[in-house]
Amino acid sequence: MNKRNYISLFSVFVIVLFALQSCHVDPVIKDELPADNIRLIVPSGWPAPVYDFSTNLLTKEGFVLGRKLFYDTQLSRNNTISCGSCHQQFAAFSHLDHAVSHGIDGLIGTRNAPGLFNLNWNTSFMWDGGINHIEVQPLGPIANVVEMDEDINNVVSKLQGDADYRRLFREAFGTETVTTQLILKAMAQFQGMLVSYNSKYDRYSRGETSLSTNEMNGLNLFQQKCNSCHTAPLFTNYQFMNNGLDSVFVDAGRGRITMLAADSGTFKVPSLRNIALTRQYMHDGRFETLEEVLDHYSSGVVNSSTISADVVGGIPLTAQEKADIISFLKTLSDYTFINDPRFADPF
Ligand code: HEC
Ligand code: HEC
């Protein structure tokens, strides 16, 4: 073969390699991912993501910029609160031990900060689904007067005046001109990379480990009693439902968005991945422990006009059944995810 043929053969090889990488679906995912491994992750057996970066090319530089923005207090009016203040990595990006969020000037919100992971699969955002796209989601907390209370145009000017950001925007997007759209694209790259798929349950599903007798009992009970709403593998069906918390709705939830009586008191079914790491529980953080949650389903369900059929009359459970379900729920904790240095605060 002459030199030219070698070169073209080599380029075909490189193209094939790239093609393989871009549509790569991991058959088995090992715990250690190289520190610079930034690519779309779709664990095997999962549905296709709703958001796949096709309109926002995922790059290491975009991810690094998005991470810095996520952890930067400059996104708040008085430079005290970052997204990471309420979304802590060690708590799977929820706000540990906070029933409802605490934001700027110590102001208190009305809802519990959910964990952030597998957001590429979300069909909507927030407990009431009031935001429908990952790329616009950060505008909510930035403008919210009890969260960050900042005007996005001020954020743009602050970042524009910062030489380090000008460099990061150039590296990520080829321009030093900071815009709202580029801020949002970079943040979507960071948030979209927060994929949690390495819990004990995942390793069990991949045939890499086994579950204990209690965990197995819990899994079987879960499949019978909980999976219709908290559907594996994402542990949510993404529907808005009423799981019997109240008979009178202080927070109308989905009803606040649609103004329909049929949606009043319904909330987005939360994923139960990492659930042992994200207390407190429910949209208003009313329960501190998983025991309290199981007591609710077993004997605390109250009737109302919009209660979901699956929880009418409660889901009676013995003490042993509750304990087994909790053992199973603990297998959904992903310690690789909460310790992944790629997602940590870079400041
Ligand atoms: C003061 C605490 C606080 C701050 C700061 C904050 N959040 Fe949140 N976050 C919350 C709360 C509370 C909710 C639930 C709000 C609701 O449902 O109405 C939430 C919801 C979310 C969701 C929706 C998750 C889902 O599964 O639906 C995302 C994504 C998110 N926040 C990202 C961010 C980003 C990005 C920032 C920074 C720009 C940020 N948050 C700043 C408290 C906070
Ligand atoms: C009818 C659907 C449905 C069924 C069945 C159901 N859940 Fe839920 N679950 C929900 C909804 C909706 C919420 C959020 C409610 C809210 O905050 O207002 C929720 C919340 C939770 C939470 C709190 C999550 C968080 O992040 O705060 C846990 C834990 C939980 N459910 C566990 C279970 C278990 C265990 C079972 C089976 C015994 C079960 N659920 C059955 C719909 C359901």
Image: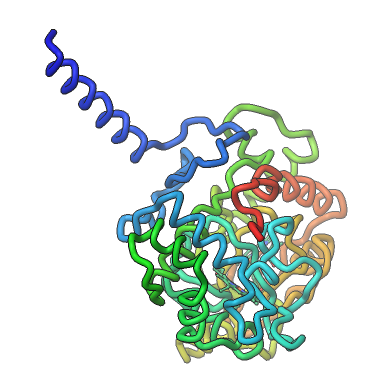
Give the number of marks. Answer: 0
Horizontal arrangement in the rendering, residue 35 relative to residue 287 (left or right): left
Horizontal arrangement in the rendering, residue 200 relative to residue 292 (left or right): left
- Image quadrant where one finds the C terminus: bottom right
Q: In the image, residue 86 lies at what x, y percent?
A: 69, 71
Task: Out of 79 and 147, give the one closest to the viewer.
Answer: 79
Q: Does residue 225 appear anywhere in the picture?
A: no
The residue furthest right is 319
The residue furthest front is 163
169 lies above or below 25: below
| Color scheme of the displayed model | rainbow
Q: Does residue 40 appear anywhere in the picture?
A: yes
Task: Out of 22 and 275, give the one closest to the viewer.
Answer: 22
- Identified at 79% across, 46% down, the residue is 327
- Identified at 62% across, 66% down, the residue is 71
Q: In the image, residue 243 lies at what x, y percent?
A: 65, 72
Q: In the image, residue 148 lies at what x, y percent?
A: 62, 83
33 lies above or below 323: above
Horizontal arrangement in the rendering, residue 293 relative to residue 258 (left or right): right
- Image quadrant where one finds the N terminus: top left
Picture quadrant where residue 214 is located: top right
83 lies above or below 202: below
Picture quadrant where residue 248 is located: bottom right
- Identified at 80% across, 50% down, the residue is 321
Q: In the image, residue 261 lies at what x, y percent?
A: 51, 90
* Quadrant of the image where one finds ligand 1: bottom right
Task: Out of 203 and 180, give the one closest to the viewer.
Answer: 180
- Identified at 58% across, 83% down, the residue is 253
